[in-house]
Image (cartoon, grey):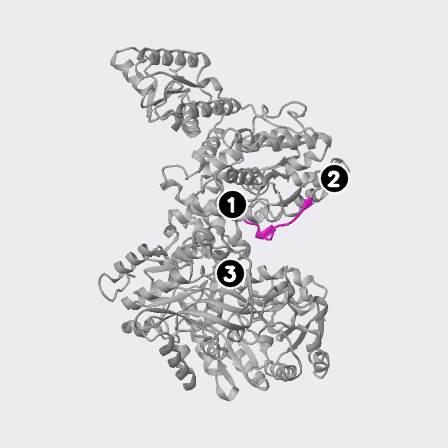
Amino acid sequence: MAVLAPTSESVRAGEPRDGSLDEGLRILAQEGCIQCNKCTLSCPVHRADVTFSPRKVILQAYLGGADRVSERDLWACLTCGECQAVCPTQVPYPAFIRAKREALRPEVERTAPCKHGGYKDILAKIMAKPNLNQDRRAWIGDGLKVADTGDVIYFTGCMPYLDGVFTYCDSARIGKAAIKIMNAAGIVPVVANAERCCGHDALWNGDRETYETLARRNAEWIRASGAKRLVTTCAECYSMLKYEYPKVVGEWPVEVLHMTELIEELIEAGRLTFTKPVDLTVTYQDPCRLGRHSKEYDAPRAVLRAIPGIKFVEMDRVRENSMCCGVGAYSNCDAQTKFLQQERLEEAASKAENLVTACPHCRIHFSCYLDGRPVDPLPDLKIVDVTDLAAQALG
Amino acid sequence: MAAIAREPGQEDATLAFLRGTGITYQAGELLGYATDASFLTLGVPAVIVFPKDEAECVALVDHAVRRGIALVPRGTGSGTAGAAVAPPGSILVDMERIGACDARGHRRGLFDPLVVDAKGNAADLTKAGPEDELYVRVGAGRTSDETNRALAGRGWTVAVVPSSGYSTFGGNFATNARGSGTPAFGAFGDAVRRLRIAATSKEGARVLEVTDPEEIRRLAGHHGLCGLVTELDVRIAPIPRPEDMTCAILSIESEDVGRLGATMGGLMKRVAASCRYFAGEFLFIDEGIVRPDDAIRADSVLGGYFTVPPGRRRMVLLYRGRKEGMESLPRIAADFPDVAFREITFPQFRAMMAVRTAATGKALHRVNVPGCEDFIIYDPERFGDVLSRMFAAMEGASGRPVGHHYPDGIEVHYRPQAVVTKAEIEAAWAMIQKLRDAVLRPELTVEDRKEHGLGLALFRDGSPSRHDELRRLKAAYDPVNVFSPHLLLPDTQGRFVGSSFRI
Amino acid sequence: MTPEPEVLALCCNWCGYNAADQAGAAKIPYPSAVKIVRLMCTGMVDPYYVLRAFERGFDGVLVMGCHPGSCHYKSGNLQARAETDLLSGVLRTLGIGPERLRMEAASSSEGPRFAEIAAEFTETLRKLGPSPLREVA
């Protein structure tokens, strides 16, 4: 019997930094996978497609060099992080895939296979351009107050553009709810026309150039605003602005909060009171970017528990074991996705009539599934955002 | 490496068969399946199939018999001794979907378990009492993790749970795995009441249902050489209420590991005689077993176990069981003044077990090199001798031994950890040979349990009576040797000997 | 000197494109900066095509389909209308402006109509000035 030893390339990758080595391989080799297969068994894509296996991808990368990763393996990954959460040695698989996508970008002439017709991808590229004069407040409507300057920025991300394509769920509703809540607590948030897409999809799909351009453009106006805090209702924007931006934009003066963290804080400080009962049975979907990626599991739950009338039932797979909504960075939606969405929504429907999300994209993906043709029968289920629910309780 | 087909066109025939029957497969150079968690390899397989139910298994076995193709079954591939690696020219059969997926082949992690009694009749778990002998009827692809998740809500658990809860039941049976619960329920083979296996005959495949407990015990540990096990009735047990359970930690430290072993061996001998328990687990703690900033160091109860004066070794032994079975433990411990005894809570027990599991894992950028996986010392009074020899042979190598205290003996696991370079892996193998020579001796009452396989070595080094038993099983279940690639492909036989290797 | 407006004309095979073809064959002039792309049906028009055109620096996008009720595939042009209505909102938010996207109908025999629309749209765009995304050399 032979013992499989990796290529000298991957062994060398574990040594002190050498700029010429593939970043993806360096990430893998430094951690050292023991091939236990826990990752594959916990991977949602693997459940739907047994030939997709993170373990296998890692072994192939180890043995043959990271250019052995097939296109399918590269793009089918949701980067949800379930694998890393169960890995005994914490191999950072999503980071490896991200680095691999980046490494391949020069060879891939077309854009990454962004689903839904490339909509979000091209929007991000447009927003990366300098001479843009967006009207990012038109969706706000009457009765809600926003400002040009202030201490608190409400970062809206793609929200002004989501309803242009994802017509089956009203995403602007989330933003309106957020502003209503902030106004009720005496906060008039800054909503800036200079805002750009946060660059989440660009970064996760390997387009570092677009991502860094967007990040720098955002950092410019955020710094100039003088604001001290930044709040967002999107888990993806949150993970970008809190954890990724500081790595590339230099001085980063704002404290970044998810809306649920702000609501929790306002309730504890007595600046917000829920007076109107919301009589619903709900369960909660931990978004990958807020949960596993950012480790924020508690604030959304605290908000739900603070809303009078809510009956909150947890699903079986929650927190670090939460199951992804089926699409990661808008780059992989296929037949397997529909099985995953069916599985998760069945689990949710077995617990409650309403599934609460804390990321507009989870809501879009689940709503898309319900708007289309479910693979199997599904009880009635409504997908509702946590900020929206909180606003309903304000009366 | 290209696949070596026995006859030209054989591979085409297999692909045509797979396409015709709709069995999911992957073909081509499958680097990703060249090994399991052992990093041992026989080459790169050319075909892997993923049957989703028993019918597909039967069709596959039938095809293999007619064509004379070897089949190598594999569970989740978590084995660390190369038992599920396939030589070129054979078909690797991934069994993880059996009994675990829906009609479309989508693997469903959440499921409603079918509970049966010893006769195989459906039983209602909600009406069951703690003394009832009950089983879950599950496909071979199910894991104990997901089954326990399904049972937990009703307060039951799989009775024998190996430390890798994500290994399949098929794999657990194939290796006759031991684990948590073994002191009360035996090895995995003792905890199975019925199984179905897709076996062979000269004409083709046949499905056998085995219900005789003795036959099941003989089959346990077959390592995939007798057929494809598709379904099992696996013993379950009630989860004891917290108030009925007790956990304890015993600790000893010494500069002389022989004396340490002699003391603990004496203690374990008395515990085996006087106590009943679910789990008896031990580990050796050194300063580096957890990181300096690990939260467990700050724990008011457990932190103290992690400070070890230089030059001394500490062994920590954990027990978990029902109160009434463990009554005499404190009195026994009191007779050994060098041993510190303390009762702990179940969460504290779990926290120490997590350290133990991580200890058998690996440091960064290292692999466990298999070879001295699990040996059992039948006479606990020899424990001191064995430990002296073991630590002397291990001198300078990395990795930490851990073990189980079973009522019939003390089982030790040790795998050295090597940086993934040829030189280090070879050095680790050399050290293992030294260790085996030092420790695997009948006069020490030590036997290599070979729970984790290692190919022909598993059988070559076994006892003559076990050889006879295996020959009989082979004749009964796989007379055409479809599941013995080394017999179907004689020119590859030299590669299978597990105790020698090359990189 | 402001450059000529660049227009992308997405024309359906059965009506719009034939109209453009007829205009060319009959030598009816229309601005040369109108670039024509033939689709089988305007129902194919995806937000990506329109947005990509703007990202690439086009000043305007013209969608030319069949008259309502005459779509070769029954209702593709109605889908296109719904799509362009939504896209107008997106373009407004982006600051590119809804006026830069126009959907019109011209049957295969309406060559002159095609030319007229193309010219008039180009003139509108000239008054609007270049698209904010256009990189002027």
**Does the CB distance between marks 1 and 3 fall below 8 Å?**
no
Taking the view exactly as shown, the residue that stands out farthest to the front is B121
Picture coordinates of residue C34, whole percent (x, y) = 35, 18
Highlighted range, magenta = A311-323
Picture coordinates of residue B119, whole percent (x, y) = 54, 72
- Determine if the magenta segment contains residue A321: yes
**Does the CB distance between marks 2 and 3 fall below 8 Å?**
no
Task: Please tell me which residue lies in front, C6 or A106.
Answer: C6
Task: Please tell me which residue lies in front, A388 or C71.
Answer: C71
Q: Which residue is mark 1?
A: A377
Q: Quadrant of residue A261?
A: top right
- Determine if the magenta segment contains residue B229: no
Q: Which residue is mark 2?
A: A267
Disc 2 or 1, which lies upstream in sequence? 2
Residue C85 located left or right of residue B356: left
Label 1 is found on which chain of the structure? A
Amino acid tagged 1: Pro
Amino acid tagged 3: Leu
Badge 3 density bin: few <14, some 14–19, many ≥20, Cα 10 Å: some
Picture coordinates of residue B184, whole percent (x, y) = 60, 76
Q: CA distance from mark 2 to mark 3?
A: 44 Å
Mark nearer the viewer, 1 or 3:
1
Same chain check for tags 1 and 3: no
Disc on res. A356:
none
Label 3 is found on which chain of the structure? B
Task: Please tell me which residue lies in front, B307 or B146.
Answer: B146
SS at mark 2 in the image: helix
Q: Which residue is mark 3?
A: B364
Same chain check for tags 2 and 1: yes
Q: CA distance from mark 1 to mark 3?
A: 46 Å
Picture coordinates of residue B335, whole percent (x, y) = 71, 84
